[in-house]
Amino acid sequence: MRRRHYSGVIEAIGDSKGLRGLERFSVSVAPDGSRTLHATCEIYDRNVSKDIVYSVDRDFRPIDSYVRLIKDGALLGSGRFQFDGNGAGLECDSRVLGHVAQRIDQRGGFPSFGPHPLTCDIWHLARYDHDSGVKVQYIDSALSSLEHDGCSGPMLHPIRFGIEFLGPKTITVPAGTFETHHYQFHLEGSLPQEHPLEQLWCIPGDFIFVKIRVDGYMSTTYQLTELVR
């Protein structure tokens, strides 16, 4: 069995802080279209690193995920998420909460999941139906943390948010020039704290990360600096 692979590096550049962090990712795609992401995320200004393994089916629906968080040089928490047609479950060991077993039932399961690599922000976009004629489409998803950079938990948090398609766009980042699709998240009322505007650019088909821009108090550009296919 031969698998298809691609990998890359993403930099987080704050408007006032400069380089805030790095994400290194690799994805392997099986012949049946399912794929597995391995990502290492380092957030320098929060002294946090994350290791994530996340598998989805050919339609980018979640199968399972493992999330491990290190903060200030010590383990903050680790957990394994499992998804099925009736919802999702979690087994987690947390420095703050101890051992946690969690189950959330949802009819039809969760169509997407955010374990918080930037590459997974892009994978939410696979839920957008370009043939529906609906400009802003809302999905019932789940996150491993309600913090914008995933630096808590991990826990299982259901969330509902909107995706808007803004059109095709040719953009240039350090990794090169790409023909992308441009989207925007609608997160109003979906999180306990205000979340700034988030715009996303990706290579369609494989939904490969190219760029994310977050305004407001974060004021950060996340951009692809290396891509190997």
Image (spheres, helix red, strand yellow):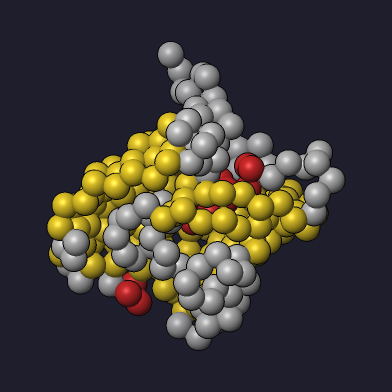
113, 31: nearer the viewer: 113
Quarter of the figure that contains the C terminus: top right
Residue 75 visible, this angle: no
From the top left corner, tell me how far across and down residue 189 is, in percent: 58, 69
Drawn side of residue 185 relative to residue 18, left or right: right
Quarter of the figure that contains the N terminus: top left
In the rendered image, which quarter is residue 66 located in?
Answer: top left
In the rendered image, which quarter is residue 162 located in?
Answer: bottom right
Residue 14, above or below 8:
below
In the rendered picture of this protein, how many numbered marks are placed on residues?
0
Drawn side of residue 197 relative to residue 55, left or right: right
Residue 10, above or below 31:
below
Residue depicted at x 54% and y 73%: 195
From the top left corner, tell me how far across and down residue 85 is, in percent: 48, 30
Residue depicted at x 58% and y 81%: 216
Residue depicted at x 48% and y 75%: 193
Residue depicted at x 51% and y 19%: 31
Q: Residue furthest bottom?
A: 16
173, 72: nearer the viewer: 72
Residue 33 visible, this angle: yes
